[in-house]
Amino acid sequence: MKWALIEAPVPNSPSGKYISQIPSPNNLLTVASALMCIGVPKEEIKLYNFLKERHPPIIKAKNIVFNMGEIITMDYLYNYAHIYLDKLTIANLDSNIFLTGYHTWLHPHIKKNYLFNTDIHNTTPHYFENDILQSLPEIMGKHTDPKTEWHNAWELNDWDFMNANVHSVTKGIRCTIRASRGCPFKCRMCAIPQIYKQKVVRNSVEWVIEEIDTLYHKYNIRQFGFLDDNLMVNKKWGKELLNRMIENNYKGASFTFEEGLDVPTACDEELLILLKKARFTHIKLGVESFNPATLKFINKPYKDPKKAIRAIELLKKHKLNPICFICIGFPTDTEASLKETIDKLIELKVKLRVQILWSYPGVNFADKGLSRKKLKEIQCNAMYGTNSVAWRRKKV
């Protein structure tokens, strides 16, 4: 085998526990498309999904793409991925190893000093399909159109893994797709502005429809999640997509946001009506805080907490089941302000996702407010009893 595409083992993360939080290996599937486009036979490419493994078998190949994280950026979750990379490197002494995913953005100098012939290349987090054309001398002469919209090579997906781990009794396998990358906003606690420099690269509506059609008709998929950083921020594009989805009438399907919808966009009632008609069921909303000082500090695209309340009320009105993200741990947070935010969201009867602020490049103000212990206590108390999938056990 000449190309091994490996999803790194991250078994101690939420992505390894719950169906609704396990992403499809979209990075690797677009890599496969790029490889086939430049002439690599499909038979020379194999995908290995080790996301839930702790000690997966060591794969040997001439070229290896190692994807470290579709979504999660927290260092402590990647112990098994690092251990496996060490073993993988030693076992492939004369190979090229390409690292991609958000975790490699956090650690751009992951290169081991084995004094072997193994070459380890760091690529951009989610643009490997472009990097690959510049990284290997043997394919430098094979040019592709820079405007190519790379489809996921679903025929190379590990469907046995999906059937075993991302499958529900009522709706079958669940798949994720990503129609765009980046976000134009500059929220200070978010890695996306650091990675994409506020640029948004968006595939055409036709590309999205072709992806959904392939999964719906060829693979009988009925659960879809969009991994986009801010799927509907371009409302004109978003409404065009939703109208096409409505026209195609994907009977029996359901669609969700895996990341978030920003509050100002969620106040567009015309858009919400289309989302409901297009069979969206759950919308994750980037609320973050109801404290005006915190909203100003983190540079949210809205400053008045009443706007977030309005967005939640509209989502509930159209039965779009809002799941509200809040981030805690900013210097402007106090116990009183966090209690006010959480109490209000509980009063509004929405599901909560409470995330403690995590440090990464560009975010160096963590641990300057409330203690980590206090933040964890607040997080636990908020998440219990709000019907959150990850926090259903009784409080002890």
Image (cartoon, rainbow, N blue to C red):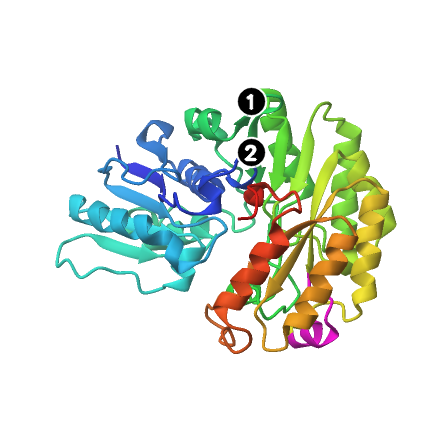
Bin the neighbour count of mark 2 within 10 Å (Cα to Cα): few under 14, some 14-19, many 20 and up. many
Q: Is residue 266 magenta?
A: no
The residue that disc 1 covers is 219
Amino acid type of disc 2? Cys
Does residue 356 appear in the picture of this structure?
no
The residue positioned 60% from the left and 34% from the top of the image is 211
Q: Secondary structure at mark 1?
A: loop
Q: Secondary structure at mark 2?
A: strand
Residue lying furthest front in this view? 396
Relative depth, front residue between 3 and 362: 362
Q: Nearer the viewer, mark 2 or mark 1?
A: 2
The residue that disc 2 covers is 175
Principal SS element in the magenta part?
helix
> Where residue 182 appears, x then y in whole percent?
59, 58
Amino acid type of disc 1? Tyr
Relative horizontal placement of residue 145, taking residue 184 as reference (left or right): left
The residue positioned 67% from the left and 73% from the top of the image is 294
> Where residue 344 appears, x then y in whole percent?
76, 59
Indicate which disc, 2 or 1, sits on the residue closer to the N terminus. 2
Does residue 369 appear in the picture of this structure?
yes
Bin the neighbour count of mark 1 within 10 Å (Cα to Cα): few under 14, some 14-19, many 20 and up. few
